[in-house]
Image (cartoon, grey):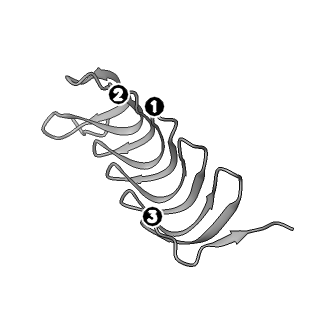
Amino acid sequence: MSGSEVYKISFIFPNQDKYDGDCTRTPDGILERNGYGVHTTAGGIIYRGIWKNDRMNGLGRLEHPSGAVYEGEFKNNMLHGTGTYIFPNGSKYTGQFNENKVEGKGEFTDTQGLEWDGTFHYTAAPGLKLKLEM
């Protein structure tokens, strides 16, 4: 068997998480999430997107019960690359992420709808400028 065959599965984990989507079998016979799939945790967090090597890798959307939503790139189960994070209060950050942290060029829209752009480092944003469209 080549291992490249893709299976569609619906699986409930012992912790009551659920996965619906594509998977492949490793050479030693273990099923891994690979391809497109939806993973829902028992706590209500939903990931819809691409899986590689049993981890969130590629483009996806992560929704939290709090209302927070991340849409963008993932690497090894982390927010990594370019994406948009909408906070529960409605404010929004679009830009670069590095291993779950806001890092690099980005734009932040606050709860008043004001847009700020600059370079972000973790949560601090030195040199942040208010963006005004006149």
Q: How crowded is mark 2: few (under 14 residues within 10 Å), some or many (20 or more)?
A: few
**Residue 4 marker:** none
Query: Which amino acid, mark 2?
Result: Gly
Cα–Cα gap, marks 1 and 3: 22 Å
According to the image, label 3 marks what residue?
A: 123
Tell me the quarter of the image containing the C terminus: bottom right
User: Is tag 1's residue or tag 2's residue first in the polypeptide sequence?
Assistant: 2
In the structure shown, which secondary structural element does the residue marked by tag 1 occupy?
loop
**Residue 65 marker:** 1
Q: Are marks 1 and 3 in contact (CB under 8 Å)?
A: no
Identify the residue at image location x=78%, y=67%.
Answer: 132
**Residue 43 marker:** 2
Query: Which amino acid, mark 3?
Result: Thr
Identify the residue at image location x=35%, y=27%.
Answer: 43
Q: Is residue 60 above or below residue 30?
A: below
Left or right of 98, for residue 115:
right
In the structure shown, which secondary structural element does the residue marked by tag 3 occupy?
loop
Q: Do the residues labelled 2 and 3 touch (CB within 8 Å)?
A: no
Cα–Cα gap, marks 2 and 3: 26 Å
Q: Residues within 10 Å of mark 3 (few under 14, many from 20)?
A: few
User: Is tag 2's residue or tag 3's residue first in the polypeptide sequence?
Assistant: 2
Q: Are marks 1 and 2 in contact (CB under 8 Å)?
A: yes
- Picture coordinates of residue 81, whole percent (x, y): 46, 61
Q: Residues within 10 Å of mark 1 (few under 14, many from 20)?
A: few
- Picture coordinates of residue 124, whole percent (x, y): 47, 69
- Picture coordinates of residue 22, whole percent (x, y): 38, 32
